[in-house]
Amino acid sequence: MLPHSYELPAAILLVLGGALACLAGYRLFRLVLAIYGFLFGAAFASSMMGATNTTGLIVAALVGGLVGALALVFAYFVGIALVGAGLGATVAHVTWGVFRGNDPPLVLLAVLAVLGAIGAMILQRYVIIVATAFGGAWTVIVGGFAVAGQAKAVKGASTVDVWILYPTSPSPGTRWIPIAWIVLGVFGTAVQLGITGKKRK
């Protein structure tokens, strides 16, 4: 949650950060961890502030973002497991949402998150590439909707001037979004495997 006037700059950062993760996530994994740690930390910390407290929202977002970024960067292997878990949870949300139109059951979410975390630790390079490509692709889509000013992408409460980001549902009911996500994710994976994520000799 941020003041509404910060919607466009935050959305642009989402698009740029998502593109960086999608196309060069493996090569710049620590930076990607810092970016996503900042986003999660800022979202969590600012959600605990009152919607009318503009200064509090900004300070909470900055402090929470810095704590989140440092936590993921310094906990590198934990970060890898969390990336895998996050990818599993994202897959659960997107696929269940397409077929059922609501949130997935907690058991399915937990199972896919655990499987994603285990897979990330066993096949680090490939899981990092796929996770950053698809995670970055989803971030680009969410940020793109916010930049375009789609009413369904972001919801602003009518009584307060705040912007609330919904990262798992950029535009409910729009069936082309999962297809765009898959296409962009596959493209990012191919770019990383073929160019940016190659092992250095």
Image: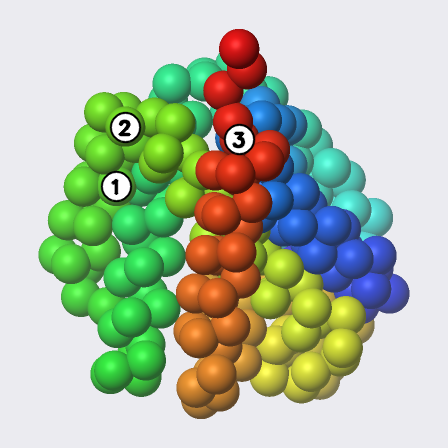
Mark toward the start of the polypeptide (3 vs 2):
2
> What is the x, y in percent for residue 66?
67, 28
- Which residue is drawn at the image coordinates 43% and 73% (left, top)? 178
**Residue 135 seen by the camera:** no
Label 1 vs 2, first from the N-terminus: 1
Q: Which residue is at the front of the view, 88 or 19?
A: 19
Give amino acid for label 3: Gly
Q: 41 and 49: which one is in front?
A: 41
Tell me the quarter of the image containing the N terminus: bottom right
Residue 60 appears at what percent x and percent y?
A: 69, 41
**Of the image marks 1 and 3, the number of the one nearer the N terminus:** 1
Image vertical order of residue 52 relative to residue 156, above or below: above
The residue depicted at 48 percent of the width and 83 percent of the height is 176
Q: Which one is closest to the eye, mark 1 or mark 3?
A: 3
Label 2 amino acid?
Leu
Q: Nearer the viewer, mark 3 or mark 2?
A: 3
Residue annotated with mark 3 = 197
The local secondary structure at tag 2 comes to loop
Q: Which residue is mark 2?
A: 123
Percent coordinates x, y for residue 75 in the rendering: 45, 17
- Image quadrant where residue 5 sits: bottom right
Mark 3–mark 2 Cα distance, whole angstroms, equals: 14 Å
- Choose top left, top right, bottom left or bottom right for residue 62: top right
Label 1 vs label 2, nearer the camera: 2
Please report the residue visible at 59 percent of the width from the left and 35 percent of the height from the top. 195
Could one spot residue 185 in this view of the protein? yes
- Tell me, for residue 116, which label it has, or none: 1
Q: How many marks?
A: 3
- Circle 1 SS class: helix
Crowd class of label 2 (few under 14; some 14 to 19; many from 20; radius 10 Å): few
Left or right: residue 155 compared with residue 129: right
Marks 1 and 2 sit apart, C-alpha to C-alpha, by: 10 Å
